[in-house]
Structures are given as C-alpha cells and as structure tokens.
Image: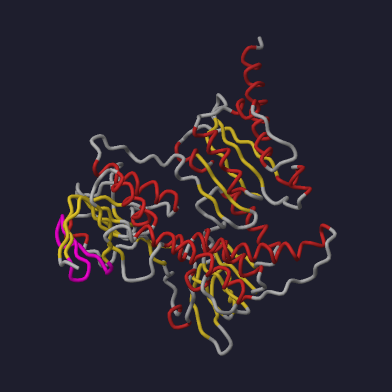
Amino acid sequence: MPDSFDFDLCVIGAGSAGYSAAVTARNLGKTVGLIDGPGPQAGLCILRGCMPSKTLLRSAEVADAVRRAPQAGVMAGEPAIDFGRVMERKRRIIKGFADYRIEGIERFPLLRGAARFVDRDTAVAGDRRIRASRFIVATGSVITVPTLPGLEDAGYVTSDDVLEFDSLPESVVVLGGGPTACELAQYLARLRVDTTLLQRSDTLLSGEDPDVGVALRSALEREGIKVVTGVKLIKAEKTATGKIVRFEHGGHSHTVEAREIFAAHGRSASVDGLDLEAAGIEHDHKGIKVDAYLRTTNPNAYAAGDVRYESTQLVHVAVYEGQLAAANAFGASPVAADYRLQASRAIFTEPQVAVAGLTERECTALGRYCAVARYPFDDLGKAIATDKTEGFIKVLADSDGTMLGVTIVGAEASDLIHEAIALLHFKANVRDVMAMPHLHPTLAEIITYPAEELLERLENEKRALVTP
C-alpha cells in the first residue's frame, strides 16, 4: 500500500454519516477515500446503538407479553429467560447487519488507523498521508461518564457493556433518565433485574415536554422500576456485596445499593486526537462547529453526524447530514440543512415515545401561539382491546388549524408518528386529518380525536367572530 494518497474527498469515520457521505460523493463522480479507526467496523448504530438495543428490547418485550398473557385468558406462567440464547440471537442479527455494511465500506479505498490532521488539506492515518480537496469529519460520539466522586473506584458499566453482558446482575442502579437510560432500564427490569433509576432533572426525558416524562415514569413504575427524579448525586462506593450510590432528594440524604451501577448519561462528540486545530476547524466539547451548510471554519472541511456541534444523535439525521455535506462540498449551489422534520425522533420504551414538529416547550420558547389537544390511549377502542392503554397523543396547531407538531406516548408510537411527519411535511391542517379516512379499529385513528377537538374549537371561534 502506498504511503500517500490523493482524493477529491476524504471521509474520516465510516459510520452512518461517513458512509452515506462517501456513497453520495462517489455517485457524483468523485474519488473518495475512507479513514476508519482500528476498532470494529459498521458504525455505532449497528454495533453498539440502535440495532443491538432494539434486538434485546424485543426479547424483553416478549418476556413481558408472556407475563401479561393471563389478562387475555392465556395461562402461560413466569417465563424462563435463557440469557445465553437472548445474546446469541442479538449477536447473530447484528453480525448480519455489520457484514452487509462492511461489504459496502470495503468498496472504497479504506485506510485503517487513528486519523489526525497535519494541515488544512492533509490528514494522516498511521504512517500514511492523505491529501484531499474536501474533507468530511464523521467520527461520531463516545460514551459520556458522569463526574461522580468514587465512581471510578466503585466501578460501573456503560450502554456498551449492557449490550454485551454475559450474565445479568441481580440488581442495578441506573444513573440518567434519557432515552438510553429508560430503554435499557426497562430491558433489564423485564429480564428480572431489580432496577432503580436516578435522574437529576425533574422528569424523565428532560428534553421533551414534561407530560411525556411523567407518563413514561408512571409506566415504568407500574412495571416495578424504582424511579427517583430531581436528585443530586453525591458519591459512589464499593461494598463487600455490591455498590452504593449516595444522593440527595427532597432535602434529605438517601442511598441505593445494587450489584452494578449503569452510567447512562449519554454521548459526546468524538473529537479527541484529531488535531482539528491543525486544519483550522473550530470545536469544543459539544462538537465541531458548522454553518448552515455543514461547513466548518475550514471552508474545505465539513462535519456530519454525532460529531457535529450539538448533534441530535439520531441515525437518520446522520445519514441526511452525510449526504448533504457531500453534496454541498461539490455542488455549485449549496443547500442549508433543514431540521424541522429531520429532528423527528422515537424512543423505544413501552409505551414508546415519538415526536414530530414543534413541542409545547419549543412554541413557548419561540413565543409562538399553539392550540393543544390531547387524547388518551385508554379511551381508544383498539388500545383497549389489545391492552395497550398507556399514554396519549398530543396535537399542536396554529390559529388557522395548520398543524405544528405531534407528540405520541403510546403503543407503536415510532410507527404512528410517520403519519404526523407526512402531514407536517405537506403543511396539513387539522381539517385535512378529518377529511382523510382512518380505518377502525386501529391505533392510527387516535390522531383524529385531537384533530376533531381542535377543528371544533376553530369553528366555534369562527362563529363567535361573525355572531353580532
């Protein structure tokens, strides 16, 4: 292999953002080289994120369904968990995804090794130099470990470790209340791990509207998870039989003991070791700073995916940004990133959480009027018939009925939200929702109830304006 290379585009990182950038540039007729680190290939989503977690969540969902079977008159008893088979299934499925992605990656010139910049148009991977007219940095993110006295000495696991457990601990205390913490806390609890969740914010999923976190907390607690919010973490300690976390809550000191501590405080941009300063790329602990076109402070370098400043850390966004960065790098008319609907998201707890468009919190921050209507799953025929009654749907509309956002906490929310995304994409009005057929009995028809309420309000307001 030669010691130096020249490409139209060099992509640093071969995860979801980097791979999609490379494919886009190749389709534009550009020469593309990929630099990827020495670790396993295929990217976070496939190896340590979306896919392995959802595969394991499925096993936990089946176990929970067996326990609930008597509600439907099916007497199954407590399920026996063969954890070895749970993990074997996960590894087999993930290997299939990874092999397919690696096959695509290896169609590009691929340089393995830790990458770093030496100047504005040159990077190195090991002892090989790569020059390119454009760069895209897509190095993803790394686990964020909370600063807690005693945590390192006591020992802890991260989401990476939870996804690779060889055996389950008898008990766990989860530090964090975000998507990963909530999903994996429920997974562990459903496999009969005694689970306590400690969250510093007042509600779970603190980035969403408070009613979302409140609803999810109620559901988790009904499954036996001990949830404490609004805590101040004080210290972690190792004991003869496990580990202790000391915290303050409600003005009092408390302790919780478990066999394991799961530090689930999210991820941060992976920028260490890249020598971004040598390339004139501005960054901080929140990631690489970019303009509306994903261009960094080096006009020939772009950033995409989790490494971007204050990234949403969503895979579909990473793919979108990788494609957009590559197109903008070589296009005559660059296009600004538009996150209005790209920021749509789902959390795969049960009940699931999904959000598209604006939230109440965002409308308040923007000083924007929004009419709000909610409808609970426990009043929906299909939800009642299938014992899926947790949660609600919430629709936000402008004063003329134009839809602004939809939030769903409930069964199959990650799929139901796509109707909302389509409606928002086409700038639909609640009148359009009512004009569309919705099959009965379905979960999808739940959106018609808040839409109907909002439409009725609009019609009443209109009549009030014309009544002498």
Q: How many marks?
A: 0
Furthest-bottom residue in this view: 240
Q: Residue at x 65, y 17 (%)?
A: 464
Q: Nearer the viewer, residue 233 or 446?
A: 446
Q: Quadrant of residue 112?
A: bottom left
Q: Please, is residue 380 above or below residue 176 in the view?
A: above
| Residue 322 drawn in magenta | no
**Image position of 377 (left or right of 28):** right
| Residue 121 drawn in magenta | yes
Query: Percent position (x, y) of residue 233?
Result: 50, 70
Q: Quadrant of residue 286?
A: bottom left
Q: Which image quarter holds the C terminus? A: top right
* Coloration mode: secondary structure
Majority SS type along the magenta span: strand
Q: Please, is residue 42 above or below residue 327 in the view?
A: below
Q: Residue at x 53, y 68 (%)?
A: 92
Instruction: Please provide the residue range marked out in magenta.
Output: 112-128
Q: Residue at x 57, y 73 (%)?
A: 88
Q: Please, is residue 58 above or below residue 299 in the view?
A: below
Query: Percent position (x, y) of residue 323?
Result: 35, 46
Query: Percent position (x, y) of residue 167?
Result: 58, 79
Q: Which image quarter holds the N terminus? A: bottom left
Query: Percent position (x, y) of residue 289?
Result: 28, 51
Q: Nearer the viewer, residue 113 or 60?
A: 113
